[in-house]
């Protein structure tokens, strides 16, 4: 093996720890094996990286800032494959070089903190990676300390014991007790930056191999995919290129440590020196978690009120202590081998004065638990086997919710909002303009009050089974608290007026996502969402509604605002002192933006495979997950979107809203909208109806409710959620489209009547799959997965009528009337949109027929293009059969001449070479007599079946 060494003197960590070395790590390889394996039921041509394909590994070592050094290890084809012992032996070399090896050998514990980027790719270069990442690789039942998400983002939830041997089975140790901690910069990168982006951010630009391609007369991108040739032709350049990724990883990780240290100095969080948090979310969680523990007088006042309500005549002391045990934090200690929880009740006098009680509560109340309404058990001191101390919670359950509101809020969580109102190709003319709520989630955070769900609910006089006429009474009652922003959760029936033309954004979880209906029954919602429906004219029947105990926000100030709102305000002000786009600016921005995300962590019940056993587990709640706050963040943004809609309609009542998302909308107007007029209109609405919003925007956001973004007067494609663009590139929300401009989508696809674009996604196996799936064992497999992206609608609403614009059309849509209508229309609508060309004038009439009859109660025929595949699962051989059956129903319903119809379908089979399939076998096309019998049988039974008009038109039958 070739080993090169290079000083790295400018790598200086902000702290030192004699028990830890920081190791930045990367690898270079070239996948050398082609194979065909079954993935998702299809045989896929793949590249597979074997251990012999690893060209080199690169490392950076830093022990107490002593002569930090970069190392490059190149293996020849005849050398043994890499093992983790190569790292350990090189670490020994480094420690000897700086003269500390003998001291380190004597340590009781020594930790290697390994920094990577997308670490699963690099960790799997070692032959013994499974053993390294699992303390007991024989027992796959144990919960893993390794967290592997997004395939190859890998970090440890707690340190892993290192047991390393070389190829001769000789133990390779640094100290008596070596530990491994892994941190992956992928989870610490702002805005999903790649490694090149992080390098640019910290001033280490990525080396461009394409200049070497050009100098050596090779095709563009050659060296990037032929690393062995780069080594043969340019060894010095290869070493510089490969070490650069280690430099970026080391310097970016150091920047995060410096950021954490600054947070501690500024009083945010309890970050320990030289202990990198595993993710940006965990940094924000640490900040919020620390703030949640802080004393506040209003919670103490509420506790005293509740204590005063206890019955003093019967078991007062017992009730007093029982009540406080649920909301106080005990001192946990061991006495004679028994775990004791001491609540320090003995420190209170028998009859404490008001001040003595207040002082005692201020010291012993668990403000964090009270603010969240739940706690996790101390599993390190209990026998509870459903969780493991400091290890990922595998159950997605809170063990000790203090009341029903927590579970109601979990059921009410829906996330963001994203709907297309008018879909298709919007013609030239007028102005299409994108409007955003200014700092939507930051605004929302400024309007969420400090809450105490741990103390139960604050009940108004009546909140069970309130008739529609009484919802106004609730609105009036909440004016005494925080108006529309009063935090509560309940179960409602909601019905919007039939003539309502605005956004219907009252969500209900149906079919795996938030859906929006004009009539909703038994829907769990935050009060703010119910209020938003009410101000839109909806009728609201209240089955049950509870309001959490909460502080009262003082208008125009942060008094009474949640910890998240305070944090967002502080870090927004920190941003204003930073250079725009600097690492500090991006980190402060991340704190502002993630205050919402971390409160919602785990609520969607997403799963991820466990590294240790391969089985899926729920992505767990974080220690600051707070569903009451999470639902409030999104409910507030929906209220503000409705306020924006109303304000725009006051300025221009003819405005068409093409689509809207959680924090903004796209409008189409004859004349350009004036942003100042919209702001003035919002000011008028909020000053009268919503003074908290009005004062907050003026005091903390310079009076700017909204910001004006992209605009165009050109022809615009508005085809489905987040697929909005114009010919002049002024609007370009392109979903999964990359390496193509909006102009090219028009010229190469839409103008050519092409209904799909083939998108190629590059896939790579994750480290968990490499461990547990036989076909991927120790083989990192990569392949290109082509998928068809349809230029159509997502059926989030019901298409009603179309408008011709030359060769294109655009469609008006409406909300589903009910959950029942959604169940009937949604899936058939999505299926039929896989046929024909949705945005084409030529097909519009047939789509219109289909949707009209679907709404009239006709049942569609089976969509064989969607449901039927051949043996390999990748082609559509049943097309002729599908056309034949749809044609028979069409002929029967329209009473066409059967002989002429039969001759026409026979001609189509001959022209296209179709086969007729009955069951699973090919047969001759049925004879005319059989065709006639089928048509008569359909007519006799009066079958209310809906033929696929789009398919029949596509085949020129109608």
Image (tube, helix red, strand yellow):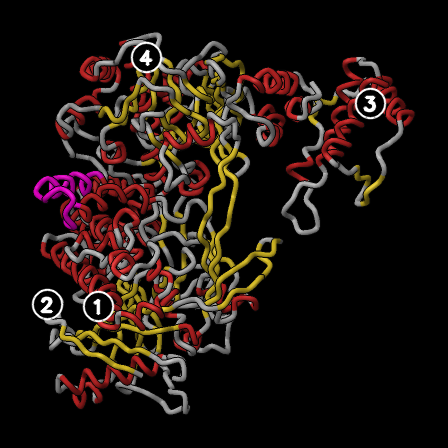
Residue 33, horizontal then vertical, whole percent = 49, 68
Q: Judging from the image, what secondary structure is the residue with disc 1 in?
A: helix
- Judging by the rendered image, the residue that carries numbered circle 1 is 240
Comes first in the chain, label 1 or label 2: 2
Q: Main secondary structure of the magenta part?
A: helix
What's the magenta region? 565-585
Q: Looking at the figure, which quarter contains the C terminus?
A: top right
For the residue pair 736 and 858, the one nearer the viewer reads as 736
Q: Judging from the image, what secondary structure is the residue with disc 2 in?
A: loop
Query: Of discs 4 and 3, which sits in the foreground?
Result: 3
Residue occupying the far right of the picture = 929
Q: CA distance from mark 1 to mark 4?
A: 54 Å
Residue shown at the point (48%, 62%) measured from the top left: 47
Comes first in the chain, label 4 or label 3: 4
Residue occupying the far top of the picture = 653
Query: Of discs 4 and 2, which sits in the foreground?
Result: 4
Q: CA distance from mark 3 to mark 2?
A: 82 Å
- Judging by the rendered image, the residue that carries numbered circle 4 is 430
Q: CA distance from mark 4 to mark 2?
A: 57 Å
């Amino acid at each position: 093996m070739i080993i090169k060494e290079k000083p790295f003197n400018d790598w200086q960590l902000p702290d030192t720890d004699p028990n830890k070395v920081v190791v930045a790590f990367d690898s270079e390889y070239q996948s050398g094996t082609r194979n065909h394996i079954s993935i998702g039921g299809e045989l896929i041509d793949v590249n597979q990286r074997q251990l012999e394909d690893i060209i080199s590994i690169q490392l950076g070592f830093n022990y107490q800032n002593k002569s930090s050094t970069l190392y490059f290890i190149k293996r020849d084809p005849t050398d043994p494959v890499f093992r983790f012992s190569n790292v350990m032996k090189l670490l020994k070399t480094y420690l000897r070089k700086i003269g500390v090896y003998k001291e380190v050998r004597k340590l009781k514990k020594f930790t290697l903190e390994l920094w990577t980027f997308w670490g699963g790719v690099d960790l799997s270069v070692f032959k013994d990676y499974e053993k390294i990442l699992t303390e007991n690789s024989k027992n796959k039942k144990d919960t893993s300390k390794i967290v592997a998400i997004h395939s190859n983002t890998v970090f440890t939830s707690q340190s892993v014991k290192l047991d390393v041997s070389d190829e001769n089975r000789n133990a390779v140790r640094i100290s008596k007790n070596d530990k491994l901690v892994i941190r992956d910069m992928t989870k610490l990168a702002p805005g999903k930056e790649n490694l090149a982006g992080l390098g640019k951010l910290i001033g280490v630009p990525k080396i461009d191999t394409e200049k070497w391609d050009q100098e050596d007369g090779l095709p563009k991108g050659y060296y990037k995919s032929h690393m062995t040739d780069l080594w043969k032709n340019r060894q010095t350049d290869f070493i510089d290129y490969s070490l650069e990724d280690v430099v970026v990883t080391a310097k970016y990780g150091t920047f995060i440590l410096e950021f954490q240290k600054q947070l501690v100095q500024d009083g945010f969080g309890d970050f320990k020196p030289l202990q990198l948090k595993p993710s940006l979310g965990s940094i924000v969680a640490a900040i919020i978690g620390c703030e949640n523990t802080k004393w506040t007088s209003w919670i103490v006042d509420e506790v005293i009120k509740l204590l005063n309500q206890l019955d003093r005549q019967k078991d007062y002391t017992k009730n007093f202590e029982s009540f406080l045990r649920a909301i106080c934090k005990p001192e946990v200690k061991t006495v004679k081998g028994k775990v004791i929880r001491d609540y320090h009740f003995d420190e209170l006098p028998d009859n404490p004065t008001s001040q003595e009680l207040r002082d005692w509560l201020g010291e012993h109340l668990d403000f964090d638990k009270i603010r969240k309404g739940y706690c996790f058990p101390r599993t390190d001191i209990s026998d509870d086997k459903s969780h493991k101390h400091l290890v990922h919670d595998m159950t997605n359950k809170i063990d000790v919710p203090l009341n029903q509101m927590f579970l109601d809020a979990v059921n009410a969580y829906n996330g963001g909002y994203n709907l297309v109102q008018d879909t298709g190709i919007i013609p030239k003319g007028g102005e299409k303009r994108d409007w955003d709520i200014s700092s939507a989630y930051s605004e929302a955070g400024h309007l969420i009050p400090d809450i105490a769900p741990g103390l139960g609910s604050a009940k108004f006089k009546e909140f069970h089974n309130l008739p529609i006429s009484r919802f106004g009474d609730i609105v009036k009652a909440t004016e005494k608290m925080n108006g529309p922003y009063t935090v509560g959760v309940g179960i409602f029936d909601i019905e919007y007026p039939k003539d309502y033309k605005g956004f219907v954004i009252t969500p209900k979880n149906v079919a795996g996502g938030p859906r929006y209906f004009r009539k909703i029954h038994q829907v769990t919602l935050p009060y703010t969402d119910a209020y938003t429906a009410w101000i839109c004219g909806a009728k609201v029947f209240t089955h049950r509604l509870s309001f959490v105990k909460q502080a009262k926000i003082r208008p125009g100030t942060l008094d009474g605002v949640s910890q998240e709102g305070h944090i967002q305000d502080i870090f927004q002000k920190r941003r204003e002192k930073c250079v725009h786009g600097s690492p500090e600016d991006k980190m402060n921005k991340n704190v502002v933006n993630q205050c919402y995300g971390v409160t919602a962590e785990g609520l969607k019940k997403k799963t991820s495979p466990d590294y240790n056993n391969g089985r899926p587990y729920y992505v767990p709640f974080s220690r600051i997950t707070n569903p009451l706050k999470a639902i409030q963040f999104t409910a507030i943004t929906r209220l503000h979107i409705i306020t924006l809609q109303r304000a725009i309609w006051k300025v221009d009542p003819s405005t068409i809203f093409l689509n809207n998302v959680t924090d903004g909308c796209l409008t189409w107007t004859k004349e350009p909208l004036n942003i100042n007029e919209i702001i003035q209109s919002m000011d008028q609405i909020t000053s009268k109806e919503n003074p908290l919003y009005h004062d907050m925007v003026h005091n903390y956001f310079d009076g700017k409710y909204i910001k004006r973004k992209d605009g165009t007067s050109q022809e615009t494609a508005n085809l489905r959620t987040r697929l909005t663009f114009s010919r002049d590139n002024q609007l370009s929300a392109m979903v999964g489209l990359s390496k193509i401009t909006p102009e090219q989508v028009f010229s190469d696809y839409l103008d050519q009547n092409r209904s799909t674009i083939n998108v190629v996604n590059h896939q790579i196996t994750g480290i968990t799959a490499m461990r547990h799936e036989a076909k991927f064992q120790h083989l990192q497999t990569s392949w290109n997965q082509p998928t068809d992206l349809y230029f159509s609608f997502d059926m989030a609403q019901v298409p009603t009528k179309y408008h011709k614009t030359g060769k294109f059309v655009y469609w008006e849509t409406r909300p589903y009337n009910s959950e029942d209508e959604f169940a009937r229309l949604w899936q058939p609508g999505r299926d039929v949109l896989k046929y024909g060309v949705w945005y084409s004038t030529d097909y519009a009439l047939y789509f219109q027929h289909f949707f009209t009859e679907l709404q009239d109660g006709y049942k569609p025929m089976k969509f064989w293009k969607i449901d039927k595949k051949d043996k390999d699962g990748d082609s559509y051989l049943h097309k002729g059969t599908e056309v034949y059956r749809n044609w028979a129903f069409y002929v029967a319903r329209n009473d066409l001449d059967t002989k002429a119809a039969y001759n026409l379908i026979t001609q189509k089979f001959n022209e296209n070479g179709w086969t007729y399939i009955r069951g699973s076998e090919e047969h001759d096309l049925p004879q005319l007599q059989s065709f006639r019998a089928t048509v008569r049988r359909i007519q006799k039974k009066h079958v209310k079946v809906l033929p696929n008009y789009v398919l029949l038109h596509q085949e020129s039958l109608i």
